[in-house]
Image (spheres, rainbow, N blue to C red):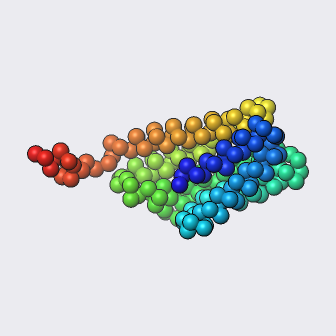
């Protein structure tokens, strides 16, 4: 299901290449609405972050189209990443709840100090993404920004996710007793 989240982005890119930023933004809004409707019809749980992204796409996308100004859609990416960073910080230091641990705690059993570092690493990553997007959006041409948004930020996210998961493997408990090798001996 996670890959479905990228379909609106792909549609945005295709419409940008075949039309312009405003048609692409409209296509992004429509694709996002269809994606959310699909999840609702299939009765898949929709995480809060997905609702936030949906609202920002519709809001900033609509402003982009109404005012015929791509500044709004460019800001959306930085705002989403900033909100993610703030949510992780507020969750941890205001509500004493590590949101990443809440999401991934069943997959990874890690010491509390590692969860805190993992959380802070993602806060830093989201800040880097927000600042990078802002820099590219307002210092380079529109095509460069679209390519960065679609390919650069997506690649950065995949690479950081892989590196961050690999970095916590050394803290995972070893499961010697249930491994297939132990059963054969």
Spot occupied by residue 183 in the image (x, y as percentages of width and height): 15, 50
Q: Is residue 58 left or right of residue 99?
A: right
Residue 124 falls in image quadrant? top right
Residue 45 falls in image quadrant? bottom right
* Residue at the image point whose x is 88% and y is 47% from the top: 68
Residue nearest the viewer, comparing 134 with 2:
2
The relative height of residue 14 versus residue 46 in the rendered view (above or below) is: above
The relative height of residue 95 versus residue 150 in the rendered view (above or below) is: below
Residue nearest the viewer, comparing 64 with 3:
3
* Residue at the image point whose x is 33% and y is 42% from the top: 170
Q: Is residue 4 left or right of residue 169?
A: right
Spot occupied by residue 90 in the image (x, y as percentages of width and height): 57, 59
Q: Total number of numbered labels?
A: 0
* Residue at the image point whose x is 72% and y is 40% from the top: 14
Residue nearest the viewer, comparing 38 with 142:
38
Is residue 138 something that shows in the picture? no
Quadrant of the frame with the C terminus? top left
Spot occupied by residue 96 in the image (x, y as percentages of width and height): 49, 63
């Amino acid at each position: 299901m996670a890959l479905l989240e990228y379909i609106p982005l792909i549609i945005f890119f295709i419409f940008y290449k075949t039309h312009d930023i405003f048609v692409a933004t409209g296509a992004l809004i429509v694709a996002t609405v269809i994606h959310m409707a699909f999840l609702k019809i299939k009765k898949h749980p929709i995480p809060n972050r997905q609702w936030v992204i949906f609202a920002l796409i519709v809001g900033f996308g609509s402003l982009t189209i109404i005012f015929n100004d791509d500044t709004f859609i460019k800001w959306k990416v930085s705002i989403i990443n900033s909100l993610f960073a703030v949510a992780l910080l507020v969750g941890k230091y205001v509500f004493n709840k590590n949101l990443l641990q809440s999401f991934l705690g069943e997959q990874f059993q890690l010491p509390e100090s590692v969860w805190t570092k993992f959380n802070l690493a993602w806060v830093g990553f989201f800040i880097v993404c927000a600042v990078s997007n802002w820099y590219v959006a307002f210092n380079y041409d529109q095509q460069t920004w679209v390519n960065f948004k679609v390919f650069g930020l997506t690649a950065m996210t995949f690479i950081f996710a892989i590196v961050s998961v690999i970095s916590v493997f050394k803290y995972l408990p070893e499961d010697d007793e249930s491994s297939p090798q132990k059963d054969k001996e």
